Image: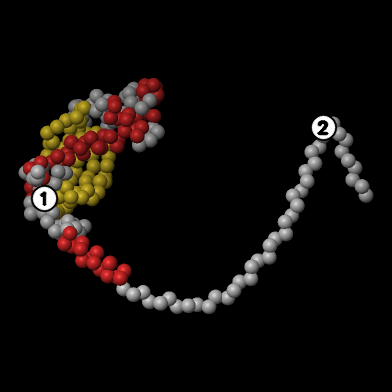
Amino acid sequence: MSIDAAALTGRANYYEDFAAGDVYEHVRGKTMEALENVLVTNLVMNTAQLHFNEELAEQVAAQKHRIVFGGVTASLVIGLAMQDTGEQAVEEVSLDKVRFRVSVLHGDTLHAFTEVLWKDDSPELLRGHREVGLVHFRHWGVNQRGETVFEGERRVLIKKRAFSLDGLEAGAGEAAPALRTRRAARGRAMRPMRRVAVKAVKPAKAAKKLKPPVRVAKSKGAAPRKKRR
């Protein structure tokens, strides 16, 4: 059974489909659940209590509620943008200029937006890949009140429509010559090893065994002995 991988992804998210200045409003929104925040916060051993200690948050936080760990917020927003900007990705290159503008609370619903800043398919930027191009995105997330909660810039290598896996696999025909070369090298006669005269080393004298010191237990209440002169 063969599967056409191209049929599993979108038809309009290849390198050629992006143009500098394009802005996307991604179709899905996502409500932030307490489980997502607290579970990931604990799994990565984030010890900032305002992410998981409700009692403390009620006492000191301006929102009087636990706030969502920024790593979860960033993952959610970029995840919402991934179907349009990452399905044809070959390599994630960088994520920087990350900013968290407004705290996210449990129950907030986030929506993702993306702007294409620039793209380039110069060979020196392709990191050894073929038929791909580098696209620079700016992502931001907005809550149900229209407040921007997250923004960041991401660079990713994206397939062109001409991209193919042909020639990238290590086929049996390519691996066989290397295997034969190794076997041939093993079968060659080894050069005789050069003999080097080694001086005999006298065995070290056995160290004299020392008698272990005899410990005398002091009896309770006994007067100490005087040293003889």
The picture quadrant where one finds residue 125 is bottom left
On screen, residue 187 above or below 86: below
Q: Mark 1 or mark 2: name the one nearer the start of the chain.
A: 1
> On the rendered structure, is 73 left or right of 22?
right
Q: Sort mark 1 into few (<14), some (14-19) or many (20+) by Cα contacts within 10 Å.
A: many
Front residue of this view, candidates 16 and 214: 214
The image quarter containing residue 224 is top right
Residue 209 drawn at (x, y percent): 72, 56
- Indicate left or right for 181 with 133 as reference: right
Residue at (90, 42) in percent of width and height: 226
Q: Tell me which residue sits at (10%, 48%) in the image.
A: 14
185, above or below 130, in the image: below
Q: How many marks?
A: 2
Marks 1/2: CA distance?
91 Å
Mark 2 neighbour density, 10 Å: few (under 14) some (14–19) many (20 or more): few
Q: Amino acid at mark 1?
A: Tyr
Whether residue 5 is visible here, answered yes or no, is: yes
Where is residue 9 shown, x and y percent of the image?
A: 10, 42
Q: Which image quadrant is residue 77 in?
A: top left
Q: Nearer the viewer, residue 203 or 122?
A: 203
Q: Determine which residue is flagged by label 1.
A: 15
Residue that label 2 marks: 220
The residue located at (16%, 62%) in the rendering is 173
In the picture, measured across the screen, residue 107 lies left or right of residue 20, that is: right
Residue at 20%, 50% (x, y): give it: 91
Which mark identifies residue 54? none
Q: Secondary structure at mark 2?
A: loop
